[in-house]
Image (cartoon, rainbow, N blue to C red):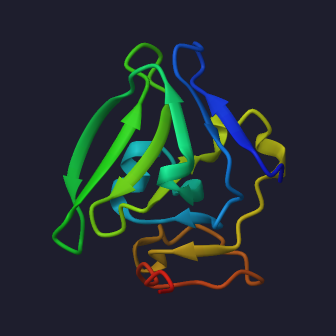
Amino acid sequence: MNLVLSGGCACGSIRYRCASAPIAMLNCHCRDCQRSSGAAFASGVVAITADLQVSGTPSTYSVRGSSGQSTTRSFCGGCGSPLFTRSEANPQFTSIRFPSLDDASAFAPMLDIWTSRAQPWVCLDAKLPHFAESPQPPG
C-alpha cells in the first residue's frame, strides 16, 4: 500500500490523508462492526491518529465496547459513508474503513478479530491469524 493513505466519503465533502504507513489491516467481526457496516464484518486500516488529517466535519456516534470504554464511529452526514473508528481504550490508533481509501485495491487483511462473534456462515481465511476478541496493541 502507498506510504500515504488518502481517501474520503462518496460525495467528496470529507477527505483525509495520513502520512504514516498502516499499523495493520484487519477484519473485525464484532456485532457493532456488523451493524455499522451492514455486512458480516468491517474491514479497516489501522493508522496513527496523530498522523491523520481530516478536511470536512464527519458526523459521529459512540457505543460502549466490551472493555466498558467508548468506541466512536465517524461517517459522512451527507452520503452516509463510514470513515473511521476510534476507541477510548486505544485513542492513539484510528481504524480507517477500507472502502473509503482512494486505492482500496491494496487492502490486504493481516488478521481477523472478534471471531467469537463471527456469523456461523462466514468463511474465515485459514492463512490469517484469528483472535476471539481484540488483541492488545504492543507497548
Q: Is residue 16 above or below residue 64?
A: above
Q: Is residue 29 left or right of residue 86?
A: right
Res. 57 image quadrant:
top left
Total number of numbered discs in the rendering: 0
Q: Is residue 119 above or below residue 116?
A: above
Front one among 120 and 66 = 66
Front one among 41 and 1 = 1
Q: Is residue 12 left or right of residue 61?
A: right
Residue at 37 percent of width and 19 percent of height: 77
Q: Position of residue 109 (x, y in %)?
A: 71, 65
Q: Position of residue 130 (x, y in %)?
A: 58, 84
Front one among 26 and 90 = 90
Q: Is residue 21 left or right of residue 97?
A: right
Q: Position of residue 76 (x, y in %)?
A: 43, 23
Residue at 30 percent of width and 48 percent of height: 72
Residue at 54 percent of width and 36 percent of height: 53
Res. 45 image quadrant:
bottom right
Residue at 83 percent of width and 45 percent of height: 105
Q: Position of residue 115 (x, y in %)?
A: 49, 77
